[in-house]
Amino acid sequence: MTDPTLALTTRVQQALAEAFGPEWREVDPVIRPANKRQTDADFQANAAMALAKRVGKPPREIAQAIADQIAADDGLIASVEIAGPGFLNLTLRTDWVAAAAGHQLEDDRLGIPMPEHQIVVVDYSSPNAAKEMHVGHLRTTVVGDSLSRTLEALGHDVIRQNHLGDWGTAFGMLIEHLLEVGEDSDDAKLLETDPNAFYRAARAKFDSADGTSDFAVRARKRVATLQGGDAESKQLWVKIMDFTRAYINRVYRDLGITLTDDDIRGESSYNDELGEVCDSLQEQGIAVISDGALCVFQDEFIGRDDKPVPLIIRKSDGGYGYATTDLATVRHRSLDLHADRALYVVGAPQNLHFRMVWSAADKAGWIKGTEPIHVQIGNVVGKDGKILRTRSGDLISLQFLVDSALERAAEVVAESRADLPEEERATIAHQVGIGAIKYADLSVSHDSGYTFDLDRMLALQGNTGPYLQYATARIRSILSRADAVQFDGPIVLSEPDERALALRMLDFGPVVAEVGETLEPHRLAAYLYDLATTFTAFYEHCPVLKAEDAAVRDSRLALCALTRKVLVKGLDLLGIESPDQM
């Protein structure tokens, strides 16, 4: 076992059973890291405080009874002391920490546990077809991808779903514009290189003459023919989607995102179900006609007028909206995919919409054994605190942000590693630039905003992606200078900084498990930064290559190797590469 919290939980539960009877064996002893400003202990158990009323004894008396049972332990706990009103301060045996670190070094999973298996759908990125991905897509894409990687590492079956906006009235004008410019024209290729330009050109034609031009009339008719299944319209729609996939795949490739074409499950895939969704809700009495539209009114969602907020599932003109598609989507994920959890990594403003949709779907019997979860995404802002926009007021494109980061990273690497061949510098610059963007995003809570500041993101000091990448490269350099093929110890901990590093590495598996439960990647980012700073303290105070004897040297090299493994794996779960050199 390499998880100290789990080991201590088991041991304190055993002590509870020995002190008060077997019926107390399953009580949570509430093991927490000790407050280092108050004690030198490793962990604290708060069981006595929680049990006082139930046992009918003062907390300190309960704590003493537990401590008396633990005192005889000779394999896990070195010391136990009672503090304050009844806290138990627990210090692990150093040889147990060393042995656990050795097991972690040998473990391909590095201590990452395998919790109860789940099927988890992760809906993320979800750009609109024929439109450029903008800054608003950065966080959903990066956070969703990290959660997918982490959940897979925990042994869950992850079903990635890219809910493309690939259907609707806009496709009428896009298809007509494509016909006018020609499918093989340079204008058509803008769908792959500059989709916003293609979209704006189509929109300008549609809006001319207040939407009464021949083009606008044809565009409206084309929507009807497309939704009616017309073969030519469908072929042209497929052409636009081919261009769209090429564009988004290029962005994903630059960012190192794991989404593929097989993960696309756009709005269009539910088109044939929307009529039946509406009919079913109406037949069950969940949806009613209001002013010509089919709506769901739920008493749980009251507006400012003290009346239920309508969830419109069919417009008065017979068209369907996002709510209809989202109802079909959650039904599919629950009843067809049998998801245990369905994560929607989407902007925070959509929270009310999702809660209304899920509530209606639940009333219809379409959510069975599935927990839909909105992983709320905050904004990316500039140094002025405002959402990043161009001078014309458009949201800044995601590709522009990526290119800016890569360009700035190339300057930094060229300056710091002029000795390297240009091709190697380019590879490192890409790894560092993308790592800087992702870490800046993932190091803050996903539901809060953060400032996009390239100078800060690319700094080699402080809580940044490049700092962690540099740490992995630095350790690799240390190991490469050692005259050894394997770094398997054994690990022996004689210095406080050695022990602190080994103990911190044992937290890796529990932290990954916590991210899988809380869906908060910033917890992993914070852990990795703390581990890197702990390693720095170790390296400053404990000579590695010039250690006093071979056994100490081997042990410290093993600690270096384990640290690098944990950092590299942790960064990989965040979607960040670890350069061999920087």
Image (spheres, grey):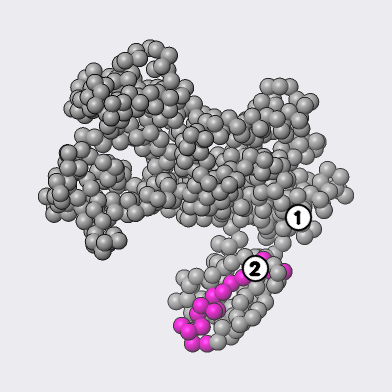
Residue tagged by mark 1? Answer: 498
SS assignment at label 1: helix
- Taking the image as shown, residue 401 lies to the left or right of residue 217, namely right
Work out whether residue 54 or residue 286 is closer to the camera in this orientation and state it.
Answer: 286
Q: Is residue 82 above or below residue 351?
A: below
SS assignment at label 2: loop
Whichever of labels 1 and 2 marks the residue nearer the N terminus, that label is 2
Residue at x 80% of width, y 38% of height: 482
Q: Is residue 399 above or below residue 460?
A: above
Classify the position of the N terminus by image quarter: bottom right
Q: Which contiguous range is marked in magenta?
A: 40-57
Work out whether residue 105 or residue 506 is closer to the camera in this orientation and state it.
Answer: 506
Q: What amino acid type is highlighted by mark number 1?
A: Glu
Work out whether residue 506 or residue 421 is closer to the camera in this orientation and state it.
Answer: 421
Residue tagged by mark 2? Answer: 34
Instruction: State how far apart marks 1 and 2 are (Cα).
Output: 18 Å
